[in-house]
Amino acid sequence: MFSGAEVVAALKVASVTHVVWLPDSDLGIWDAALSAADGLSLIRVCREGEAFAVAAGLWLGGQRPIIFLQCTGLFEAGDSLRNFLHDLHLPLFFVVGVRSYKAHRAGASSDTCPLFAEPILKAWKVPFILLSDGSAAEDLAAEYLRAEAGNRAGAVLLAE
Amino acid sequence: MMTHRQALEVLARHRGNKIVVTTMTSGGIWPELSDTPLDFAYLPSAMGQGPSLGLGLALAQPRGVIVVNGDGCTLMNLGCMATIAAQPAPLFVLIMDNGLYEVTGGQPTAAAGRADFAAIARGCGIGRVYAYATLEEWTANASEALQGVGPVVIVLKVEGRMGQKTPKPPRPMSEQISRLRDAIA
């Protein structure tokens, strides 16, 4: 959907300092650009629950983190998300790649991930927007800044 | 073997000006030993996420972070050892290994008596790993272990206690967060 350069530019608009991630095949194409970006640190985790915790620590320490993960990682990270967003009330922001979203809409995939991504985000009470074909990386930055202005957590779903 | 409290008493003497993040059992004992804005009782927690939270804090600011984690919590997030090893952060993770889940009735962990947390940490690439089975060893080496370049993992064999409940934090989480952020700003 977006190139690595476009994502890096969007993150700079949002003054993001750290990307905490475990990428999928769509998000992973940004690896080189994120790794090379000046003023941006890329932190790789082993499982997505860690990403929320690391981002929480960064935020407590005054940094501006963002989390990138696939929807399967979102499902796995549930308790960590619950704790940091709803027990500690931290305004963390994350980008979720929704595997097979477009194929599912076209009736061409039996992947169950698209069935659950939006309902689970709603169940976790996380405001989000969906970006798909025709969206721009700037939309990601705008939503990050909108969440920050509201002192709330937020998410972007990327239709893959 | 040492008690949990004895282990933390040694820590209290050598923590310097580092942030101390406590979890589960240690969250109940530590406030009796130290209660400053740099002491963060991570309660309620997502079990296992203490070291990852500490990593983020340690990457964010240079004063150093000590996380006191249980062996049960560590098992829930073993991968964090590899994540931590990849980051040159001033992070010190203490693993209080008693082989059981104290707050649920003292059931043994799946790894009790088998897993070697020091070997796991070394195997994940942590450069500085220490393991102490007695109070005397920990007392003699704590100063060195808690200084210098991180990340560091310190495994302490401690006695388990039965009949424990999940401790309550010394103050509401919102207040802990405000105090910590103000102190490190």
Image: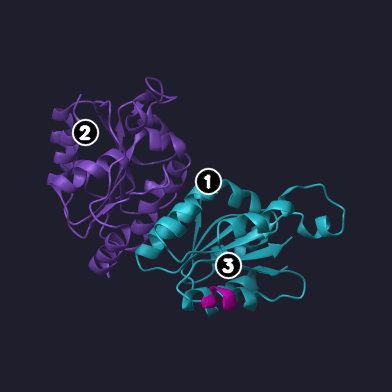
Chain colours: A cyan, B purple
Which structural element holds mark 3?
loop
The residue nearer to you, when weighing A60 against B25, is B25
Kind of residue sitting beneath label 2: His
| Residue on which the image places disc 3 | A127
x then y, percent, for residue A133: 77, 71
Residue at position x 58%, y 78% in the image: A142
x then y, percent, for residue B136: 13, 28
Which structural element holds mark 2?
helix
- Could you confirm whether marks 1 and 2 are on the same chain? no
Judged left or right of residue B163, residue B84 is right
Looking at the rendered image, the quarter that the C terminus of chain A falls into is bottom right
Secondary structure mostly taken by the magenta-highlighted segment of the chain? helix
The residue nearer to you, when weighing B149 against B7, is B7
Label at residue A46:
1
| Residue on which the image places disc 2 | B4
- Distance Cα–Cα, label 2 vs label 3: 42 Å
x then y, percent, for residue B11: 18, 42
Residue at position x 41%, y 50% in the image: B52
The residue nearer to you, when weighing B170 against A141, is B170
| Residue mark closest to the camera, 3 vs 1 | 3
Residue B109 seen in the current view: yes
